[in-house]
Image (tube, helix red, strand yellow):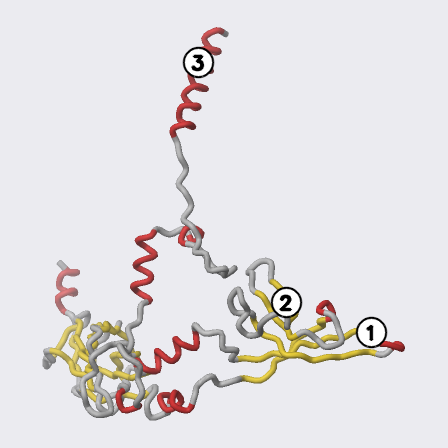
Amino acid sequence: MTHIMILFQIVWRLNCFQMRKYHPPVPKPVPKNNNSLTISVFDMGISDEEWERLQKALDWPGPDQQITQLDLSTSPVHSTFSIAGLKNNYKVGDNISVIITARDHNKNLKTYGGDFFKAKLFSSELKASVYGEVVDHRNGTYSVTLLLPWEGQAHVFVRLEHSSEVVQILKKYRDSSFPRSHYNGHFEGSGPNKTRIIEVVECNLKWGAEGSWRKGSCCCEYKDIKTGTVWQCERPKKLSCDKLVYHSRGSMENPLNPFEKQFFAKTLTNVPITGDTQIINILPNTTDIANGMA
């Protein structure tokens, strides 16, 4: 029994020493921007290095100055693509490199990146296609590596989805508090002499801590406990905030001004660009077959 007590005391002291020695990691502070929806890197369970890699992957270059003329934006007519080192024949499993050159409406080479291009290899006969990752070199040129996965013939197809100028416009409104969609809040309650009062007011999400959609004590607020999202409705003139019954969809509002709308013309977005039209001949990869038989 004495030996057991001695062993217990040793283990207890060792545990106490380890508890005093161990210091749990300090949580990373959350930025104090008064945004209830802010999630820290610590909350997401990723390292600072992983966070930096994500930020780098999401970084999208754009114009280095404010664009005040449409003809300075990327032109799908004057932008081109070419296949580097095009050969007569390839084998299944090979890659080809495609170079995209962006130019403005004055045929000048763009000096910055940010254009949204899509590049693919396709076969009309096989009804097959494969896309490649577009690498932005941030100087008006882009490169794409396309895999040749099937036997037969193929072509390269490149499309300008959005110019870098359009991307910047989209990012501006994505990050803004502009209410693109509007909603109606329906309030109902009892009035004098057993009458029924019905009021319909405008409602929308509350953007940021200050609520940039409406200011001051103008509104009734309804907070989602789980997400922290706050829903605002203009305060009814006769009824209290707890008389909200339901919502309905209101109008849609286009945030673009007349100058910005020009960049979204059908002739400038989601348009194919010209380039190498040669047929790519893809032969069977007999090397892999021979290695397998060996």
First-in-chain label (3 vs 1): 3
Residue type indicated by callout 1:
Ser
Residue 30 image label? none
Q: SS of the residue at dot 2? A: strand
Q: Distance between the residues labelled 1 and 2?
A: 21 Å
Q: Which residue is drawn at 19% across and 91% down?
A: 107
Q: Report the mark closest to the observer, 2 or 3.
A: 2
Q: Report the mark closest to the observer, 3 or 1.
A: 1
Q: Where is residue 161 in the image (x, y as percent from the top left)?
A: 33, 83
Residue type indicated by callout 2:
Glu
Circle 3 Cα neighbour tier, 10 Å, few/some/many (<14 / 14–19 / ≥20): few
Dots 2, 3 in contact, CB < 8 A: no
Q: Within the image, what quadrant is residue 210 found in?
A: bottom right
Q: Which residue is drawn at 15% across and 76% down?
A: 283
Task: Tell which of 128 and 30 is nearer to you.
Answer: 30
For residue 261, side relative to residue 67 (left or right):
right
Task: Tell which of 10 and 203 is nearer to you.
Answer: 203
Residue 190 image label? 1
Quickly name the residue at label 2: 221
Circle 2 Cα neighbour tier, 10 Å, few/some/many (<14 / 14–19 / ≥20): some
Residue 7 image label? 3
Q: SS of the residue at dot 1? A: strand
Position of 105 relative to 91 (above/below): below
Circle 1 Cα neighbour tier, 10 Å, few/some/many (<14 / 14–19 / ≥20): few
Res. 219 visible in picture: yes
Residue type indicated by callout 3:
Leu
